[in-house]
Amino acid sequence: MDSDVLVVDDSAAIRKILQRVLRQTGLAIGAIHEAGDGVEALSVIEQHPVNLVLTDINMPKMDGLQLLASLKGSAQWQKVPVVMITTEGGELKVSEAVRLGAAGYVRKPFTADQIKEKLAGILAPALPL
């Protein structure tokens, strides 16, 4: 079964790159939705339930840690895996994300292989035709 994904980043370019990388992973990816910040992400996920959220940490309005805490605090969304995609080099924010329940993190700049490796244990591979 294909997994729907929500990509959350305040950079439209990063969102497009992540969408392209997701399509190249060979994983069973369905619809890919996007949002520019955590507030928008919560609105999108209400309308389009997803199986995975990839989010930046540093964003305006609501950052990735606040989004993660909000999702994990919701009975409806607490089981959705959230992977942090970040330039954040400090262990403090990364350890905070793990404490809040992040399924993992990938540092920017990332490669397609890093994304695939991180998501392989979370999402099912695409079935061969």
Image: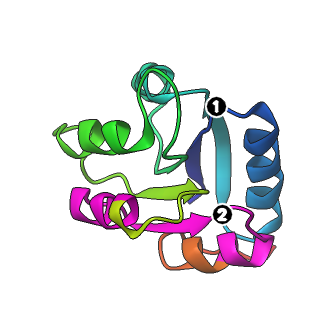
Residue 1 position, x and y percent, is 56, 60
Question: Is residue 52 part of the magenta span, yes or no?
Answer: no
In screen coordinates, is 99 left or right of 26? left
For this rendering, which residue is in front, 2 or 62?
Answer: 62
For this rendering, which residue is in front, 74 or 83?
Answer: 83
Which mark is on residue 28?
A: 2
User: SS at mark 2?
Assistant: loop
Label 2: few (<14), some or many (≥20) within 10 Å?
A: some
In screen coordinates, is 93 left or right of 16? left
Q: Where is residue 63, by image quadrant?
A: top left
User: SS at mark 1?
Assistant: loop
Identity of the amino acid at label 2?
Answer: Ala
Q: Give the distance between the C-alpha atoms of the residues marked 2 and 1, in whole angstroms.
A: 25 Å
Q: Where is residue 64, by image quadrant?
A: top left
Q: What segment carries the magenta color?
A: 93-116
Which mark is on residue 10?
A: 1
The answer to whether residue 66 of the structure is visible from this angle is: yes
